[in-house]
Image (cartoon, rainbow, N blue to C red):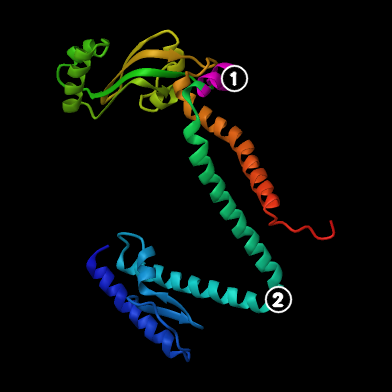
Amino acid sequence: MKTGYIYSLLVWLLSVSLMLSSCHKREEVKYVSGKTPLVELDGNVLYQEDLLQVLPVDISEADSAQFANRYIENWLSELLLYQNAERNVRDDKQIEELVENYRRSLIVHEYQQLLIEQKIEQDITMQEIETFYNDNKNLFVLEEPILKGLFIKLPLSAPNQNSIMKLYRLRDDESYDEIEKYCIRNAPYYEFFYDYWHSVSDIEILLPSMEVSLQDYLNKNDFLEIKDDEFLYLLNVSEYLPKGSVAPIEQVENRIKRLLINNKAVSYIQKIKKDLYNSAIENNRVIFHNK
């Protein structure tokens, strides 16, 4: 946002603040040091700094005033509704119980997550992941094909296209170096993904429309060369797994780890609960009345 907009908004905010404060006799409030009060209602204060913090970046001067007006009105309306609800909802005990139960649930959840991170996640081994993968391959069947390789998008005006069309079919370090040097100078987009998998749909969205689907094409071909009015698209497929194949372990490793963590977490948390219970009983911290 421009500096002038901020200044104009602050001037407007100050005028609003003065107008609102003159309309109602204020009770004494201890303001937050270093902040500028903007709107006040029954001892509740909205500060200019709080409003400026939520103001969208690069908003126009006219829109900033409109946004501030709406934000102030919403802030006052929510506060007034809450005050009215407090006067009309009298079962404070039940509400306090609900709030306390929710607070306890949040704290227990955070504690359980901390235990899981400290005691379970770090203990998952690659051996466990591999065993689970080998025993449950039916869980990891591919719903769409995946591939590894190289993709290049070149303007039709790029120089030495014959050279790069030969190089992109090769799979050696020297060729990779030459391809990268060429693409840095000429290609608006290129990607070496010989070491990780992409879904066919990830690549298909980078290509112009084809007479056959990319999936059908790659079932029979390792290389693709296709043009539209502006670009030449080159695809070298080093590995390809069709739909219905078992996903490679490196693609599902994180998913398996999460499954193992979830499986262990249930029994681990139950053990923690049981140990805490037994400890409390042994140390006479629990008193059973009328047992």
Helix, strand or loop at label 1? It is loop
Name the residue type under label 1: Asn
Can residue 104 be seen here? The reply is yes
On-image quarter of the N terminus: bottom left
- In the image: residue 9, left or right of residue 138: left
Find residue 198 and report its horizontal and vertical position in percent. 41, 24
In terms of image quadrants, where is residue 159? top left
Q: Is residue 182 above or below residue 105?
A: above
- Left or right, 45 with reference to 7: right
Q: Nearer the viewer, residue 261 or 221?
A: 261
Q: Amino acid at mark 2?
A: Arg
Q: Which mark is residue 136?
A: 1
The residue range painted magenta reads: 128-142
Q: Which residue is mark 2?
A: 90
Where is residue 191 shown, x and y percent of the image?
A: 29, 25
Quadrant position of the C terminus in the picture: bottom right
**Overall secondary structure of the magenta stretch?**
helix
Q: Residue at x 59, y 17 (%)?
A: 135
Q: Using the numbered discs, state the Cα–Cα distance from disc 1 to disc 2 in whole angstroms.
A: 56 Å
Q: Secondary structure at mark 2?
A: loop
Q: From what the image shows, is residue 118 above or below residue 24?
A: above
The residue that appears at 44% across and 84% down in the rendered structure is 29
Q: How many marks?
A: 2
Q: Is residue 20 magenta?
A: no
Between 175 and 13, which is closer to the camera in this rendering? 175
Give the side of residue 205 with respect to residue 104, left or right.
Answer: left
State yes or no: residue 136 in magenta: yes
